[in-house]
C-alpha cells in the first residue's frame, strides 16, 4: 500500500519513522515534509492547505491511506475533501475537528455531557472579560478560542497579567481570527498528563499516557510553546487516575461527539490534569500530540499501518506496548517562541542504538542540516526506565552545547524523577 502523511513537523516525522517499519507500506510520501523525512519518504512540495492538489496527488499515486497530522488542515476540512473523492483517510472531519478548533465548543460539550473540566466563561468583549477576571481573581487562565499553534494560552498569576492577555487577544488581535473570542477558566493545580486514543465513532483504543513540558525555560518558566520535551509512560500516574481519565473523559467525549452528529475518526487527544477531585480536561486536540507522539509511538509494538486500518474497519487493533520508557528533548532556535532566525547550521547528528532524532524545523543545504523553524528537532531514546531514557537523550544533545543559535531545556522529566508525588502548577 502507498501511504501519504500530510504535515511538516516532528509529529509527522515520527509517523513516517513508525510507518517505515511496516512490511505493508510500499510507497511512503510526505507533503510537504521536512529534510529529515527524506531518508524514509518521498517529500512532495504541496502545502497542507492545498486540498485540490493533495487529493490529486493521492489519486495519481494510488495512495491507499492518507494521515493528516496538523490541526489547521483538519479544521479546514481537508479530511472531507479526501472522503468526498472516495480516498481512505485517517483523520476527523472538519465538523469533528471543532473539538480542537473552538475551545468554547469543547467546553460546552463537556458541560452538556458532564465531562470534568475547569469552570469557565467565554467573551468577545474585553471589558466584560476583565470584569469577570476581577470577580474571580488570580491565578486564572486566558485562552484564545481558536487555533494558535499551542501558544494561545496564558496562565496568569495576577489580574493585571490576565487583563493584558485579554487586551492582546481581543484588542490587539495577537492571534488573528483565533483570538476573536476568549475562554477564561478556573486555574487548576496539579500534575498534567496527555492521553491519546485511536477513535472511530464510539470505539476508543487508548495509548500509554505521556507528559510534556510547554514552558520555554527550565523550572517551567517563560512563555508557552508547542512543547519542549516529553516522556512516556508517566511513572507517577496511578492506574486509578488513568482508568478514571479513560472512563469519565475520553470514552464519554467520543460518545458525545456521536450524539452531537460529529462522529470522530482519528486521534482524540486529551490534555488532562490530576486534581484532588480526579482527572479534569485542560484541552482536547483532534490529532496526534506534538511532542507526545515522538515518545509514544516508539513504545508501540504493533504495525502502525495495520492499527489504522483496523480502527477504520471497526476492528479492535489489540494494541501492545513495550515494557520500557521513552523520552525526548526538543532543540529550539534561539528566540523561540518569539522571533528567531532560520538557516543556522546544525552540528553533526549521531544517533546510535540507544537514541534517535526526529526532525521538525530543518532543511538541507550544501553544508548539511540547517534550522527552518522554531522547534528544530527532538532527541529521543528508549530506556528501561524514565531516568535511563532521559540520560541517553541528553547525552546525544551535548553536540549542541557549543552552538549559540539553539537551546534546550535541561530539566525535562526531572520533577518526576526527583519530586515524585509533588504537585506543581500547571504549565
Image: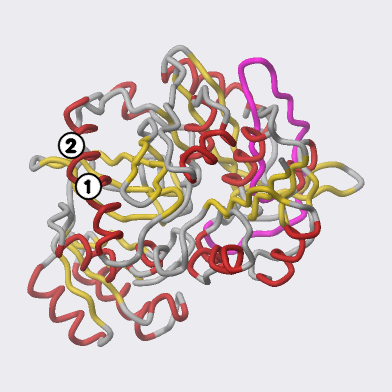
Where, by quadrant of the figure, is residue 204 drawn? Answer: top left
345 horizontally vs 209: left or right = right
How many labels, in total?
2
Dots 1 and 2: beta carbons under 8 Å? yes
Q: Nearer the viewer, residue 43 or 56?
A: 56
How far across and down, in percent of the image, does residue 40 sit? Answer: 76, 36
Q: In the picture shown, does residue 222 fall above or below 233?
A: below
Q: Residue at image x 71%, y 35%?
A: 25
Q: For marks 1 and 2, give the CA distance.
A: 8 Å
Q: Which residue is mark 1?
A: 249
- Quarter of the image with the N terminus in it: top right
Where, by quadrant of the figure, is residue 118 drawn? Answer: bottom left
Q: In the picture shown, does residue 164 fall above or below 126?
A: above
Q: Element type at marker 1?
A: helix
Q: Indicate whether residue 353 is drawn in magenta.
A: yes
Majority SS type along the magenta span: loop
Which stretch is magenta?
337-361
Amino acid at each position: 500500500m502507498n501511504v501519504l502523511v500530510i504535515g511538516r513537523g516532528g509529529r509527522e516525522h515520527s509517523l513516517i519513522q513508525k510507518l517505515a517499519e511496516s512490511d505493508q507500506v510500499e510507497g511512503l510520501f510526505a507533503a510537504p515534509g521536512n529534510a529529515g523525512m527524506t531518508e524514509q519518504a518521498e517529500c512532495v512540495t504541496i502545502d497542507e492547505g492545498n486540498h485540490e492538489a493533495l487529493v490529486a496527488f493521492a489519486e495519481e499515486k494510488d495512495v491507499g491511506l492518507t494521515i493528516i497530522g496538523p490541526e489547521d488542515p483538519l479544521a479546514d476540512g481537508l479530511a472531507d475533501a479526501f472522503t468526498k473523492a472516495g480516498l481512505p483517510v485517517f483523520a476527523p472531519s472538519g465538523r469533528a475537528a471543532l473539538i480542537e478548533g473552538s475551545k468554547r465548543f469543547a467546553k460546552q460539550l463537556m458541560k452538556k455531557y458532564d465531562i470534568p473540566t475547569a469552570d469557565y466563561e467565554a467573551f468577545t468583549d474585553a471589558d466584560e472579560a476583565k470584569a469577570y477576571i476581577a470577580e474571580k481573581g488570580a491565578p486564572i487562565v486566558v485562552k484564545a478560542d481558536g487555533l494558535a499553534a499551542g501558544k494561545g494560552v496564558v496562565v496568569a498569576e495576577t489580574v493585571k497579567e490576565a487583563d493584558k492577555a485579554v487586551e492582546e487577544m481581543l484588542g490587539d488581535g495577537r492571534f488573528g481570527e483565533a483570538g476573536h473570542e476568549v475562554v477564561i477558566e478556573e486555574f487548576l493545580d496539579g500534575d498534567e498528563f496527555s492521553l491519546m486514543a485511536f477513535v472511530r465513532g464510539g470505539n476508543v483504543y487508548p495509548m500509554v499516557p505521556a507528559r510534556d513540558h510547554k514552558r520555554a525555560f527550565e523550572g517551567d518558566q517563560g512563555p508557552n510553546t508547542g512543547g519542549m520535551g516529553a516522556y512516556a509512560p508517566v511513572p507517577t500516574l496511578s492506574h486509578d487516575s488513568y482508568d478514571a481519565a479513560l472512563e469519565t473523559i475520553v470514552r464519554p467525549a467520543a460518545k458525545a461527539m456521536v450524539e452531537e452528529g460529529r462522529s470522530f475518526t482519528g486521534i482524540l487527544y486529551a490534555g488532562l490534569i490530576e486534581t484532588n477531585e480526579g482527572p479534569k480536561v485542560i484541552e482536547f486536540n483532534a490529532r496526534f500530540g506534538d511532542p507526545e507522539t515522538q515518545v509514544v509511538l516508539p513504545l508501540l509494538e504493533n504495525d502502525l499501518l495495520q492499527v489504522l486500518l483496523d480502527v477504520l474497519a471497526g476492528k479492535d487493533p489489540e494494541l501492545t506496548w513495550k515494557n520500557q520508557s521513552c523520552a525526548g528533548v526538543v532543540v529550539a532556535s534561539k528566540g523561540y517562541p518569539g522571533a528567531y532566525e532560520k538557516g543556522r547550521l546544525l552540528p553533526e547528528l549521531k544517533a546510535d542504538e540507544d537514541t534517535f532524532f526526529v526532525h521538525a524545523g530543518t532543511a538541507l543545504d550544501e553544508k548539511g542540516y540547517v534550522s527552518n523553524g522554531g522547534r528544530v528537532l527532538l532527541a529521543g531514546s528508549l530506556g528501561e526506565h524514565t531516568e535511563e531514557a532521559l540520560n541517553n537523550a541528553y547525552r546525544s544533545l551535548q553536540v549542541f552545547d557549543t552552538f549559540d543559535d539553539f537551546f534546550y531545556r535541561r530539566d525535562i522529566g526531572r520533577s518526576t524523577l526527583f519530586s515524585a508525588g509533588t504537585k506543581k502548577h500547571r504549565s
